Image (cartoon, grey):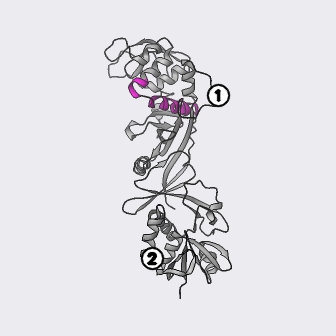
Amino acid sequence: MQPTGHLRGDAVRVAGDARQRFHDSGGYGRPLGGDEIALSRVEAAHLLFRGDLSGIAIDEDGDREKSDGEVGFERFFVESAAAADRFAVRYLVYADLRDRGFYLSPAREPWPGGDADAPDAVDFVAYERGSTPDTGNVKYPVQVVGERESLSAAGLAGRTLAVVDEESDITYFAATEGEIAGATDYEAPDRLTGVLLADRVVVWDAPEGFYERGFYGQPLTGRAAAIEGAVQLSLVEAASLAADGVLSLSASVDATGEATESSSEATAETDGPAAAVVARGRDVEGERFDRRLTVYKRLREADAVPKTGFKFGADFRTYLDVETVEDLPHSEHLVRVVEGDHRFSPRELSLDVRLAGGVRKEMVFALTAVAGDGDVRDEADDGDEHDDGDEHDAVRDAAVEWLSIGRLTP
C-alpha cells in the first residue's frame, strides 16, 4: 500500500515511513519531524507519476478531516500548473534529471537546496551522482527556461540552463565565466599614417610585419600590384591604434572623395585621429561601435588577435597565438558583443552556441558597459565631466564581463 500525501499551502506532507522511504533513500523532500516529510509540488508530482504515492488529498485550511479527497497525477499536475509559476516546464526538467540519476532539491528555503549558494533565478540544485541533499555536493545549479521566455545575460555565469522547447524537448547549456588569454607577441609600430574613408582606413606604407605578424587589417593586393605595404584597416582596428597614439590621419574623405561634414565629425576633426575615427564609426554603426571598440581593446590587451566574425554571425573571431599569417592556427572563439543588460531569447542563444560548436569554437559573449549605461562606471571615473579625450578613455576602459556558453550533457 503506497502512502497518501496531503497538500497544505505549497507543500505536500507525507507521514508513515516517508522519511526512510523517500528522503533517506531517494533524496526527496525535507524532514519535518519523526518520519514525516514535506515535498514540493514538483517532487510530489514525480512520485505520483511513478506510482510511489497513491494520491494526494487537498486539505482545507490545514484540516485533514476536510479535504476534497485524493486526486491522482493528472488532476494534481493540472491544478499545480495553474497554481505554481512555470510548473509544467520545471516538472519536465526535474523528471528528466531524475531519470539521468541525479537527486535534486528546490533551490529555495526551507528545502535543502536553499542552502546552496545559488541566485534566485535558479530553480533546482542537482547533486553529484552518488551525492544526496545531506552531503551537499552540488553539481548543477539549474535554471529552467521555456523556449518563449527571455533570460538576463547578467549573472548567468555558474548556472546550468535547461531550455524546454515547444515539444517538451530539453536542451542543456553550461554558462561559465569566460576567459580569453592569448600569447601573440607583437608590438604595434610607433607611428602609422592613414586616410580615413567612408567605412575604413587605408595605410599606404605599413611596415613589414604589421599584417604578417600583427594580423592587422587586410593588404591591398593584386597579381600586378605596383604598390607594396598598403593595408586596409577596419574602423575598430583604426580607432584602437589611434587611441594608442599609433595612427594619425593625413586625410579624411567620404565614399565620393569629398571632405566629410557629418554632424558627429564636425567637431571630431579638430580633436585628433581617435575622435575622428570613433565619430565615423558611430556614423556608420551607431553606439554599438563603442561597445565593439571596448571589446577589441580588451582582446588585444590580452595578447589575442581579434578579427571580424562576420562569416559566423559574430562580432569577432579570435586567434590566441599568431606567429605569422602564413602559418595561421584555427581561431578559438567566436565573440558576440552585447549590452550589460541584454536579455537572451533561448532561440538566439541556441543559434549562437550551435554555430560555434559546429565550427569547433567556443562561444563567448562580451557584456559591455560603456559611458552612459545606467550606474555602471569605470573605477577611475570620479564623477567629473569628461572632455572628448576623456570620453575615448572611458570607452576604452569600460567594464567587460566575459560569458562563455556551451552545450551540456548532464
Q: Is residue 187 visible?
A: no
Q: Please, what is the three-letter code of the amino acid marked with disc 2?
A: Phe
Which of labels 2 and 1 is toward the front? 2
Q: Determine the main secondary structure of the stretch shown in magenta.
A: helix
Give neighbour class at mark 1: few <14, some 14-19, many 20+ (Cα, 10 Å).
Answer: few
Q: Label for residue 380?
A: 1
At x 40%, y 28%, the residue is 285
Tell me where residue 215 appears, x and y as whole percent.
48, 29
Q: 85 or 192, which is in the foreground? A: 85
Give neighbour class at mark 2: few <14, some 14-19, many 20+ (Cα, 10 Å).
Answer: many
* Label located before the other in sequence (2 or 1): 2
Of helix, strand and loop, which one carries label 2?
Answer: helix
Q: Please, what is the three-letter code of the amino acid marked with disc 1?
A: Ala
Tell me where residue 31 appears, x and y as whole percent.
65, 73
Q: How many marks?
A: 2
At x 62%, y 22%, the residue is 384
